[in-house]
Amino acid sequence: MHELSLAMDVCRITEENVGRSALDRVREVGLEVGDRSGVEFGTFQFCLESLLSAPPFREARARIERTPGDELRVTYVEVEDGDPPD
């Protein structure tokens, strides 16, 4: 199931962009997934949502935009501002 590997890569990319200490403040990860990318959309979405809702993340969600092309890219990472909650 390469969708799980792709979802894990999205989490790795997110960590590279925000740092390990801020992963619990990630609220949303935006992605573009092309219909011709070879990704089984439903499985990928399930894997990504499962990983983002578990530690070290805390209830982050994926916002996936489907496109007609062959792209698969992280477009943004939304992080909660301010001090992390207790």
Image (cartoon, grey):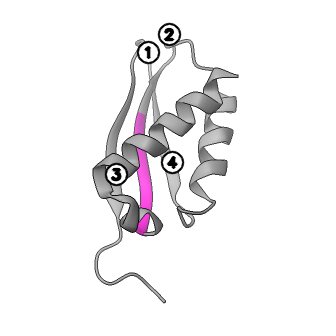
Residue on which the image places disc 4: 62
What's the amino acid at mark 2? Arg
What's the amino acid at mark 4? Ala
Which residue appears at 33% of the width and 47% of the height? 16
Is 79 left or right of 58, judged from the image as shown?
left
Callout 2 secondary element = loop
Q: Is residue 30 magenta?
A: yes
Report the front residue among 64 and 1: 1
Instruction: Measure how far apart labels 1 and 4 are at the Cα level.
Output: 19 Å
Q: Is residue 40 above or below residue 78?
A: above
Residue on which the image places disc 2: 36
Residue 24 in percent (x, y) is at 47, 68
Instruction: Measure how far apart labels 4 and 3 are at the Cα level.
Output: 9 Å
Q: Is residue 58 magenta?
A: no
Residue on which the image places disc 1: 68
Residue on which the image places disc 3: 77
**Which tag, 4 or 3, sits closer to the chain's start?**
4
Residue 31 in percent (x, y) is at 41, 37
Disc 4 and disc 3 in contact, CB within 8 angstroms: no
Q: Which residues are magenta?
A: 25-31
Residue 52 in percent (x, y) is at 57, 54
Mark 2 Cα shell of 10 Å, populated few (<14), some (14-19), many (≥20): few
Disc 1 and disc 2 in contact, CB within 8 angstroms: yes
Instruction: Measure how far apart labels 3 and 2 are at the Cα level.
Output: 24 Å
Callout 4 secondary element = strand
**Mark 3, mark 1: which one is toward the viewer?**
3
Q: Chief secondary structure of the magenta span?
A: strand
